[in-house]
Amino acid sequence: MRLPKMDPFTLSLWVIALIALLFFLAKDRKRTLGSMQMTKGMMGGLLGELTGILFLIGLILTFVPPETIKAGLGQSNVVLASILAAVAGSVTLIPAFVAFPLVGSLVNVGASIVPAVAFLTTLTMVGLVTFPLEKREFGQKFALYRNGLSFVFALVIAWIMGVLK
């Protein structure tokens, strides 16, 4: 059996995980195997959601050609694309574990990293959909400040990521 080629970081994580597994199996075999059974059940529960993620990404990449993604989110007008992506992320309610593979796929087909990061950060930091709940629980002033500052900082983070890229 031939193992796939891995970068050193991924390989080191696998080695650490294997060493930890062997250590805990030696320490308390019954509890370790019980934990592994629980994990198997949790992963089974996520299987439907992971399938949905793959389906959603496939649909987006099927119906939106890579040229369109590259034209809208590419290098042509990064500032406007970043602001539009940040607004879209602010009003979208998608779990982060769905957004990360989606954004990765968009970047792979030609989206610039800056709008992609703007979408991702506003998606997780700004919540216009959840604003009424936040306003009720924390007050309007707090909710406005938090969401406004989160929007601005999301754009700053996206810009920094573009510079670091």
Image (cartoon, rainbow, N blue to C red):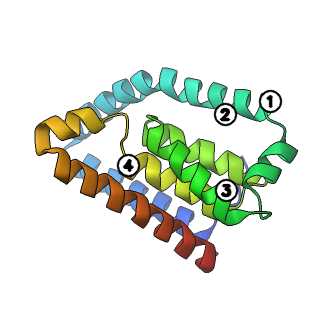
Q: CA distance from mark 4 to mark 3?
A: 18 Å
**Disc 2 versus disc 3: nearer the observer:** 3
Q: Are marks 4 and 2 in contact (CB under 8 Å)?
A: no
Asked if residue 74 is positioned above or below residue 132 in the image, the reply reads: below
Looking at the rendered image, the disc whose residue lies closer to the viewer, 1 or 4, is 4
Amino acid beneath label 2? Ile
Residue at 42% across / 64% down in the picture? 152
Q: Measure how far apart labels 1 and 4 are at the Cα level.
A: 28 Å
Camera-side residue of 54 and 68: 68
x then y, percent, for residue 51? 58, 25
For mark 3, give the secondary structure: helix
Q: Is residue 72 visible?
A: yes
- Quadrant occupied by the C terminus: bottom right
Instruction: Name which of mark 4 and mark 2 comes first in the sequence.
Output: 2
Give the amino acid type for the residue marked by disc 4 in the picture.
Val
Q: Is residue 152 above or below residue 42?
A: below
What amino acid type should be assigned to the residue bearing mark 1? Thr
x and y percent of residue 120 in the render? Answer: 51, 51
Q: Earlier in the sequence, mark 1 or mark 4?
A: 1
**Residue 62, numbered circle:** 1
Helix, strand or loop at label 2? It is helix
Do callouts 2 and 3 mark residues in contact (Cβ within 8 Å)?
A: no
Q: Are marks 4 and 3 in contact (CB under 8 Å)?
A: no
Q: Which residue is mark 3?
A: 81
The span from disc 3 to disc 1 (Cα, nearest Å) is 21 Å
Viewer-side residue, 45 vs 18:
45
The numbered disc on residue 57 is 2
- Residue lying at 54% horizontally and 57% vertically, measured from the top left: 118
| Category of crowding for the residue at label 4, using alpha-carbon neighbours closer than 10 angstroms: few (below 14), some (14–19), many (at least 20) | many
Q: Which residue is mark 4?
A: 126
Please state the horizontal and vertical placement of residue 116, each as a whole percent of the image. Answer: 61, 55
